[in-house]
Image (cartoon, helix red, strand yellow):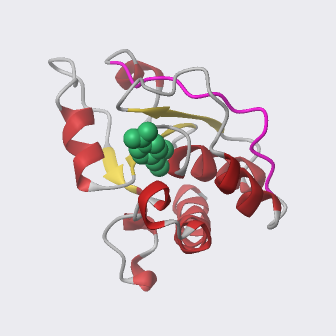
Amino acid sequence: MTHRILFVCLGNICRSPAAEGVFRALSPETATDSAGTAGWHAGDPPYGPMRQAAKARGVDLSDLRARQFTAGDFDRFDLILGMDDSNIADIEHLRPAGNATPVRLLTDFAPETGADHVPDPYYTRDFDGALDLIEAAAAGLKRHLA
Ligand code: 4NP
């Protein structure tokens, strides 16, 4: 059984805090966190437009703060979920020798959407499209853990 899940994106201000916020609302018994492969926004709250789009769906992201993903996260979590293939490559680059923690795409848990990544709304500006994918995957992830 998996009980500690880390959501990872590039900046940790749009996709992964949204995924953390959506999933913790759905599964409060699971320990969750999020991180960015880049450290540019460390200490920052989630990006305003993403906070607002999430809030419109009843998901409060205001307590979350960005941090950078580290090699130590492989030992602290049972499952690490990236938003796109670039995240996965950056995560795998830091994997300690002998560590076997699964690293998957979040969209693996939403096969019905046909999506193979969560497009970055920081660039696309499609915050609701990202949240639609994240909500579908969060539901699939919860079913997977049940
Ligand atoms: P995220 O989006 O990876 O979903 O948090 C980004 C946010 C900020 C930047 C890149 C991606 N940035 O370049 O500052």
Q: Is residue 110 magenta?
A: no
Q: Nearer the viewer, residue 145 or 127?
A: 127
Question: Residue drawn 78% across and 32% down?
Answer: 63
Q: Is residue 132 visible?
A: yes
Q: What residue appears at the point 53 percent right and 60 percent down from the top-left corner? A: 141
Among the 4 quarters of the image, the one containing residue 112? bottom left
Looking at the image, how many numbered discs can be counted on the residues?
0
On the image, which quarter does residue 102 sit in? top left
| Looking at the image, residue 80 lies above or below residue 83 | above
In this rendered view, identify the residue nearer to me: 21 or 45. Answer: 45
Magenta segment boundaries in residue numbering = 59-70
Residue at 46%, 73% (x, y): give it.
110
Q: Which residue does the image show at 50% across and 37% down from the upper left?
A: 12
Q: Position of residue 99 (x, y in %)?
A: 24, 24
The percent position of residue 30, horizontal first and vertical second, equals 66, 41
Drawn side of residue 120 relative to residue 26, left or right: left
Ligand 1: quadrant of the figure: top left
Q: Position of residue 81 (x, y in %)?
A: 41, 47
Residue situated in front as seen by the camera: 108 or 57: 57
